[in-house]
């Protein structure tokens, strides 16, 4: 789409730095564009495609880095005037060392435990879902799997425990991911009781066979 197809006010907007689509929409519809709805929409689409063809250049380096700019609401195009690489390269180190900041946080937490606890509760109440997802992803990573693999395995087991066969709706808490304690490899999904039972028997087939023999003997008498 050529620039000649754009209205004069649209070309001026592009040259002024309105390169992102959202600011483009705001500028176009607030610039006094007249005409039928069809012509307005056609003009806006022309404006959008023209802006997409423009290359945003960093003010600090000669290289063109598309989609590598931080957001900046203060600028007309909604993006920073320097690319991310230049921002990182020219970033000033924090005036206080990480060790001193860590020591300060520890002293503050120790001096104001109630205030810190209340702050953590407020934060968790606001970010509860995101924190739960993050914790679950971290726990699954420790046993060598991902949320996607966990969901696929749970579907394969028909949403049931791999040992006792009870459905997940029978439990108050989510089922556990079972893994090999020596290799760390993910093995399957178990309920809490079955997973703890395997752990108590230290994943030993010999101990489990002895337990079966013991129960058979006890039940036969």
Image (tube, rainbow, N blue to C red):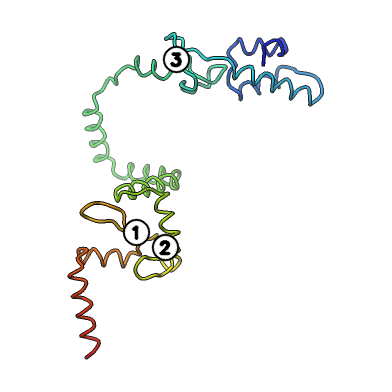
Helix, strand or loop under label 2: loop
Q: Which mark is residue 188?
A: 1
Residue 200 position within the rendered picture, expressed as x and y whole percent measured from the top left: 21, 66
State the image quarter where residue 110 is shown: top left
State the image quarter where residue 196 is shown: bottom left
- Taking depth in this image into account, of 111 and 220 the one nearest to the observer is 220
Quick check: 182 above or below 109? below
Q: Label 1 vs label 2: CA separation?
A: 9 Å
Q: Residues within 10 Å of mark 1 (few under 14, many from 20)?
A: some
Q: Is there CB contact under 8 Å for labels 1 and 2?
A: yes
The quadrant the C terminus occupies is: bottom left
Residue 136 position within the rendered picture, expressed as x and y whole percent measured from the top left: 37, 50
Q: Which residue lies under the disc numbered 3?
A: 82
- Taking depth in this image into account, of 94 and 105 the one nearest to the observer is 94
Q: Which is more N-terminal, label 3 or label 1?
A: 3
Instruction: Between label 1 and label 3, give the one nearer the viewer.
Output: 1
Q: Is there CB contact under 8 Å for labels 1 and 3?
A: no
Q: Which mark is residue 33?
A: none
Residue 24 position within the rendered picture, expressed as x and y whole percent measured from the top left: 63, 20
Q: Residue at x 34, y 59 (%)?
A: 188
Q: Which residue lies under the disc numbered 2?
A: 157
């Amino acid at each position: 789409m050529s620039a000649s197809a754009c209205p004069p006010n649209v070309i001026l907007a592009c040259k002024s730095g309105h390169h992102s689509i959202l600011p483009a929409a705001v500028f176009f519809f607030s610039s006094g564009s007249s005409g039928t709805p069809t012509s307005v929409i056609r003009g806006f689409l022309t404006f959008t495609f023209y802006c997409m063809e423009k290359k945003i250049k960093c003010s600090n380096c000669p290289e063109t880095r598309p989609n590598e700019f931080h957001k900046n609401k203060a600028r007309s195009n909604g993006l920073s005037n320097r690319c991310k690489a230049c921002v990182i390269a020219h970033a000033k180190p924090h005036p206080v060392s990480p060790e001193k900041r860590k020591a300060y946080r520890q002293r503050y937490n120790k001096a104001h435990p109630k205030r810190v606890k209340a702050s953590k509760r407020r934060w968790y109440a606001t970010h509860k879902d995101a924190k739960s997802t993050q914790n679950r992803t971290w726990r699954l990573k420790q046993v060598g799997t991902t949320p996607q693999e966990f969901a696929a395995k749970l579907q394969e087991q028909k949403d049931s425990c791999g040992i006792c066969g009870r459905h997940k709706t029978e439990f108050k808490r989510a089922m556990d991911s079972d893994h090999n304690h020596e290799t760390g490899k993910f093995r399957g999904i178990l309920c809490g009781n079955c997973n703890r039972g395997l752990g108590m028997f230290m994943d030993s087939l010999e101990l489990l066979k002895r337990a079966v023999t013991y129960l058979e003997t006890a039940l036969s008498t």
